[in-house]
Amino acid sequence: MRAVVKRPLLVLATAGSLIASLSLVGLPQAHGAGVQALVSTGSPQTTHPQNAQNEPALAVDPLHPSTLVAGANDLVDMQPCSRDAATKHAACSYPLGTFNLGVGLQGVYFSFDRGHNWIQPTYQGLTAVGCDPTADSITSPCQPTAGPIHTVPNFYENGLRSRSDPGVAFGPKPAADGTFSWSNGTRLYYSTLATNLTDTTIGTEGQNTTTGVVVSHFDDLSAANYQDQSRWSRPFFVDKNVGPTAGLDKEQVWADNAATSDFFGNVYVCYTDFHSLSGGLNFPLKPMVAVSRDGGTTWTSRQVAPPTTATPTGSHQGCTIRTDSHGVVYVFFTHFFAGTPGHGFHQMIKSVDGGRSWGPPQDVLPMNDACWFVEQLEGRCVYDGIAGARTDLAAMPSVDIANGAPTGEDATNEIVDAWSDGRDGLNHEKTFFSYSTNGGDTWSTPTAISNFGDRSAYSAPSIAPDGSRVYVVYQAVSAPIDTTSTATARPEFGVLLSAPIPDATTGTPGVWTTEFSGATPGDLRGTSQGRLLYNEFFGDYVYAIATRDYGAGVWTDTQRTADCPAMDAWRKASFDAGHRVFPAPWPLGGVGDCPANFGNNDIFSATTG
């Protein structure tokens, strides 16, 4: 989940972009053999908000391609939804927005069979599971205690809590002398935003703000050791000098994992610095990249492009970072020029010296952010209507490169980009796809590849290391936006596509196959952000991976949620009134006003392995 920062309405962009009109991409054909699986296996189906997960990340171990790791925002260690907070404040915990101070919110999940089965480990940390939801949350707020947790460990012990925006990546493990080789083994990196235990200024290691970006690591992951908490490092800050007015957001981690690279083993994190949350100085947004050359222990961060401000230069948010087989680093940001809808570009910035210096930013692909409806109480662009799920970053670039990992020897270095786009109009949002075979100098014409009849909400691609096949996962909604009612179902599900790339020279995908499409859509009305009950929530992104033999994707899924008529009616009454009305429903199943599995959005995966 992203920091709640409203993106200002801006003037539409008129600048051009560097696009070469290459071959068109084929549309999806008959269904394939993808198999779905529940990723968030430690989550209860009942007890909101413990049953809520969203914003999944996914990575594959290049040395052991049957091993997958996922991360997600996971509220499994939270208290059961407080009656007091719900009915009096329209939230599940109090003080408002705290999600129980100190309790971690970042889940981690392992699969050792190509995504057919997933395991959620149990570690030790800070938990609020035992809190009494009927207690007076104002005079006696929930006090978390040490105990079993199902989220990433070693935060509480270091005075931190894992907060939001997970990222995962695999790279080589450094030797004792600091050199990198696959013979040393593998290192899993997990990135997230972090706060201290009280959501106040962190105040350590140069963190003079409330939110920092951190990276933890785990060495030589296997089915025999994933439960070993001692193998997890402490979280390390990637930016050592964060000012008191800054707000860091939406980070992503990547490790240079091709042995042919001159910078093999480097680890990179991209993120945005909302540098003046007060709104001063015209609210500059700084695109940032941090690099570690010692396996994620020490970091150097720098601004990689001029800051954008509310006017006239648009804003930067939502990034992806990858490396090719030579170690060239590519970072992509969304260059928003917001409106209703907002138009802008995917902006590419490159480094050829391992992140020490960066070339000029280039707007390379046009996008439309599908912001057709700004929900008046949320103040955000939403996807499905009144009290809807936000769609701030639907059009952000999600990028992958065929870099030949782990050896790098069979790399084609084709770059693929996929995103959800509103250019075809309201209720016709689609996944668009583009590719480059010359280091991003030119790109294919963006082409819609999603199944016609559903609406694409978030998208992500991955290309096989040898460039032989590309996969795209997206989150789909099959009902039109509803700006007048909450009475109609809002079906949501995941889709996984793939296409062969028969000619590495042209890089053109062949016919797209629908490898998986959710057979039992859930209802987005049955979701909630937890800390704020009014709005539905399915997060800001999805992820995909590709190997030489198979591909997989993850998404936020609502197939095990239940709609709550009391919540629907309250949301509509609040919308009509122009403010939240009270008392609000108490959504705790069995004792409250909603079915037991209200809010039970899960992380699901589909694999062709």
Image (cartoon, rainbow, N blue to C red):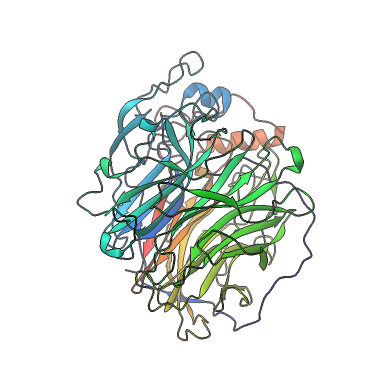
User: Residue at horizontal 64%, vertical 35%?
Assistant: 245
Residue 69 on image: x %, y %:
35, 55
- Does 157 sit left or right of 572 as displayed? left
Whole-percent x, y for residue 101 in the image: 46, 27
**Quadrant of the rendered structure where residue 370 is?**
bottom right
Q: Is residue 586 visible?
A: yes
Q: Nearer the viewer, residue 44 or 190?
A: 190
At x 54% / y 37%, what residue is drawn?
211
- x and y percent of residue 410 in the render? 39, 79
Q: Residue furthest top?
A: 139
How many labels were placed on the picture?
0
Between 465 and 511, the one lying in front of the other is 465
Going 19% across and 51% down the picture, which residue do you hit?
224
* Image-quadrant location for residue 366: bottom right
The residue nearer to you, when weighing 400 against 91, is 400
Left or right of residue 201: residue 185? left
State the image coordinates of residue 288 (x, y, percent, origin top left): 59, 51
Looking at the picture, tell me which residue is in the foreground, 528 or 323.
323
Quadrant occupied by the C terminus: bottom left
User: Compared to 135, does 408 lie above or below?
Assistant: below
Q: Residue furthest left?
A: 224
Where 57 falls versus 198 (above or below)?
Answer: below
Residue 392 visible from this viewpoint: no
Question: Vertical placement of 307 versus 4: above or below?
Answer: below
